[in-house]
Image (spheres, grey):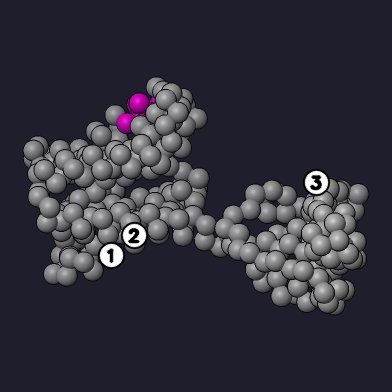
Amino acid sequence: MFFHIFLGNILLAFSVCSFVVPGSFMLGGSTGIALTIQAFVPVRLSIITALVNGGLFALGLLFLGKSFAATSLLSTLIYPVIMAVFETLPLGELFFEDRLLCAIFTGLVMGAGLGVVLRAGGSTGGMDIPPCILQKYKGIPVGTSMMVFDLLILLLQVLNQGMNGILYSIVIIVLTSVTVNKIVIMGEGKVEMLIISPKYEQIREEILKNQDNGVTFLKIETGYRREDQKAILSILHAKQYPSVRNAVLEIDEDAFIIAASVMNVNGRGYTLARTNKLEDVGVSVHSM
């Protein structure tokens, strides 16, 4: 976990020092606050970021408790330190004339850094904290308040820098968001398979014993004949789908099969250890 949080913060600090600062791009979040303050206070960005993050961390500790604050402690400590190291290096020379390409690269690198941290179960702290406080005490959704905070931070920078860089900043924010989502769910794609067939018992046995996958029975009523029946729901790794589909069709060539992509699955066999005991199969097979 520490390695991934460290790596994620390296990517974040690298993108800021190499492209955001040299390109005068605008950002939301705690880094955006630090950039806004730096426009009026000639102090190193890493120092301002440390003070901002430290203050937000204290808010999180006060209003959200130790368990929440612990998830953002690492990033709160190491992000300004890494940024301070990068500030001593000539990373600004990596910036090139095409600002759009720089903005695209910045969004991708920042999104990768944030995604790695979140995937490891950590938090970047900073402006994640005030929205969580508002949700806890006022019931305001985190996504809503986070968007409002980012817009306000961008507005402050627009008042100082003008509208010239706002479009590039929007590109960075959008690409960061998309990349974070992709990184967080990377490698977790599954296939949800719904099978409707009168031979559901035979299909159940095939999937459980020969395909080594769990199933769930769903009570259904057929629409045409109004007959009570059971459908089979199974969540598969993508590479298993062709084999399971072919096995089902061998049992019942008229089986009705629906397959859809699933981004994330939690539970036994995926995020929890599977049981090998035959008597415990009922954990994976049940009626609803």
**Is 198 situated above or below 121?**
below
Towards the viewer: 175 or 278: 175
Q: Which range is magenta?
A: 56-61
Q: Secondary structure at mark 1?
A: helix
Residue 212 can be seen, yes or no: no
Q: Name the amino acid type tagged 2.
A: Leu
Q: Position of residue 94 (x, y in %)?
A: 19, 66
Residue receiving disc 1: 104
Which residue is labeled 2 in the image?
A: 175
Secondary structure category for the residue under label 2 = helix
Give the residue at x 80% y 68%: 211
If you read the primary sequence from the N terminus, does the residue marked by circle 2 or circle 1 appear first?
1
Q: Name which residue type carries label 1.
A: Ile
Q: Whole-percent x and y of residue 221?
A: 82, 54
Disc 3, SS = loop
Number of residue marks:
3
Residue that numbered label 3 is attached to: 288
In primary-sequence order, the first of circles 2 and 3 is 2
Position of 170 with respect to 202 (left or right) is left
The residue sitting at 75% across, 58% down in the picture is 233
